[in-house]
Image (spheres, helix red, strand yellow):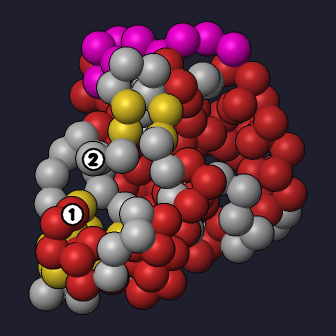
């Protein structure tokens, strides 16, 4: 597993973002047979190459959405009410109707080691990120289009998938 060099990753994204997003758009329109099996086979290869703890770009530049259950669970952990938790840490995004972090990087990210201080009770959105192993690839193409800019694992998965589909 390799440490992630964010500077190099951002440069690769700048050069290849259009190509990768274009590939995903073509997939949306014409999903190849066996794409879910293909992505399931590619995912373990990706994790052999990407070490999230050397990156944490998702926690540094994105915000998860918090469900009511997330808010209740995390508030209980801090021994505060859900209202006190949301008042202190979150804001309500009216357009998307989502609870999100007030600040970035995430307030629960320990910047010295890139570990989550609430990992065991983290939001559902975080526990599923970057959503690579989802069974229905077709339902997550739009998510991958967004995440290739932030997540080296997603970028690598789309890159490998593109090679496999063309190969």
Q: What percent of the width, then of the height, locates residue 80?
A: 34, 74
Looking at this view, name the residue that lies furthest to the front.
Answer: 79
Residue 3 lies in what quarter of the image? Answer: top right
Among the 4 quarters of the image, the one containing residue 6: top left
* Image disc number at residue 80: none
Q: Does residue 111 show up magenta in the picture?
A: no
**Residue shown at the point (29%, 14%) measured from the top left:** 7
Identified at 78% across, 30% down, the residue is: 45
Q: Is residue 149 visible?
A: no
Residue 66 placement (x, y as % from top left): 38, 74
Along the viewing direction, whichever of 26 and 156 lies nearer the viewer:
156
Q: Is residue 108 left or right of residue 160?
A: left
Classify 10 Å Cα crowding around label 1: few (below 14), some (14-19), many (20 and above): some
Queried whether the magenta region covers residue 7, the answer comes back as: yes
Mark 2 in CB contact with mark 1 (< 8 angstroms): yes
- The secondary element bearing badge 2 is classed as loop
Residue 145 against residue 11 in the figure, above or below: below
* Location of mark 1 (residue): 89
Q: Which tag, 2 or 1, sits closer to the chain's start?
A: 1
Where is residue 85? Give x, y as percent.
Answer: 27, 72
The Cα–Cα distance between marks 2 and 1, rounded to whole angstroms, is: 8 Å
The boundaries of the magenta stretch are 1-10
Examine the rendered structure and indicate whether residue 67 appears above or below residue 1: below
Q: What kind of element bears circle 1?
A: helix
| Of the pair 111 and 145, the residue shown nearer to us | 111
Work out which quarter of the rendered image holds the N terminus and state it.
top right
From the top left corner, tell me how far across and down residue 99 is, in percent. 27, 77
Circle 2 Cα neighbour tier, 10 Å, few/some/many (<14 / 14–19 / ≥20): some
The residue that label 2 is drawn on is: 107
């Amino acid at each position: 597993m390799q440490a992630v060099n964010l500077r190099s990753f951002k440069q690769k994204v700048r050069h290849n973002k259009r190509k990768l997003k274009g590939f995903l758009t073509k997939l949306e329109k014409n999903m190849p047979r066996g794409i879910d099996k293909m992505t399931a086979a590619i995912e373990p290869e990706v994790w052999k190459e990407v070490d999230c703890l050397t990156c944490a770009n998702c926690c540094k530049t994105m915000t998860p959405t918090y469900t009511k259950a997330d808010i209740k669970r995390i508030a209980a952990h801090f021994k505060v009410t859900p209202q006190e938790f949301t008042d202190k840490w979150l804001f309500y995004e009216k357009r998307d109707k989502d609870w999100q972090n007030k600040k970035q990087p995430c307030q629960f990210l320990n910047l010295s080691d890139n570990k989550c201080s609430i990992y065991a009770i983290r939001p559902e959105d975080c526990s599923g990120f970057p959503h690579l192993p989802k069974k229905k690839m077709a339902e997550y193409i739009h998510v991958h289009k967004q995440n290739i800019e932030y997540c080296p694992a997603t970028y690598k998965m789309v890159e490998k998938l593109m090679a496999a589909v063309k190969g």
